[in-house]
Image: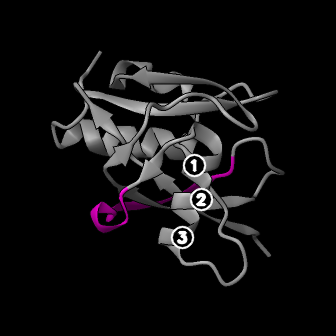
Amino acid sequence: MTEVIEKVAWVRLENGRILVVRSRGKDAYYLPGGKPEPGESDHESLIREVREELGVELVPGSIAPTVTVRAPAHGEPTGTIVRIACHTADYRGVPAPHSEIAEIAWLTHGDRHRVSEAARIVLDRLAANGRLSGG
C-alpha cells in the first residue's frame, strides 16, 4: 500500500518570485510548511509551521487555499506520496531561517530544477497562470 504524507504549505509570491526553504541536510528547496499535528486544522498547522520555520506571523483572516498537489515525496522511500494543500496568506515580520531551516530563497520558474517535485508542480501551475516569473 502506498504511504501518503499529508502536508500544508504557504505559497508566498513577491515581485514574480516564490519564497522557498531548504532544511539542514536536504538538497532541494520546499515550500514553507509541514505536517499538521493531531487535531490541528490546516490553518492552525500552517500558522504554526511558518512561525517555526520563518519567524513570521501569518494573518489568519488572509489565509486562502490556492492549489493541492500530489507527487512523489522527496527524500522518502520509493512509492511514498506527498499531498500538499497550499495556501496563500499575508504576513507580519521578516522571513528568516529558524528551527531546521538552513536557508530561504526567492525563486523564479527558471529555478524549478532546485525544488522538490511537489514544489515543481506548484511552480509550473503558477507560471502557467502568469503569477511566477520565468527566470
Q: Cβ–Cβ below 8 Å for labels 2 and 1? A: yes
Q: Badge 3 is on which residue?
A: 44
Q: Is mark 3 on a helix, strand or loop?
A: helix
Q: What element carries label 2?
A: helix
- Give the extent of the magenta segment: 59-73
Using the rendered image of the protein, determine whether residue 115 is visible from the camera's viewpoint: yes
Q: Is residue 78 shown above or below 65?
A: above
Q: Which amino acid does label 2 sit on?
A: Arg
Viewer-nearest residue: 12 or 125: 12
Q: Residue at left 41%, top 22%?
A: 107
Give the alpha-carbon distance from disc 2 to disc 1, as whole Å.
5 Å
Task: Answer whether residue 76 is magenta in the image.
Answer: no
Residue 8 falls in which quadrant of the image?
bottom right
In this picture, residue 12 sits left or right of residue 120: left
- Where residue 71 appears, x then y in whole percent? 57, 54
Q: Cβ–Cβ below 8 Å for labels 1 and 3? A: no
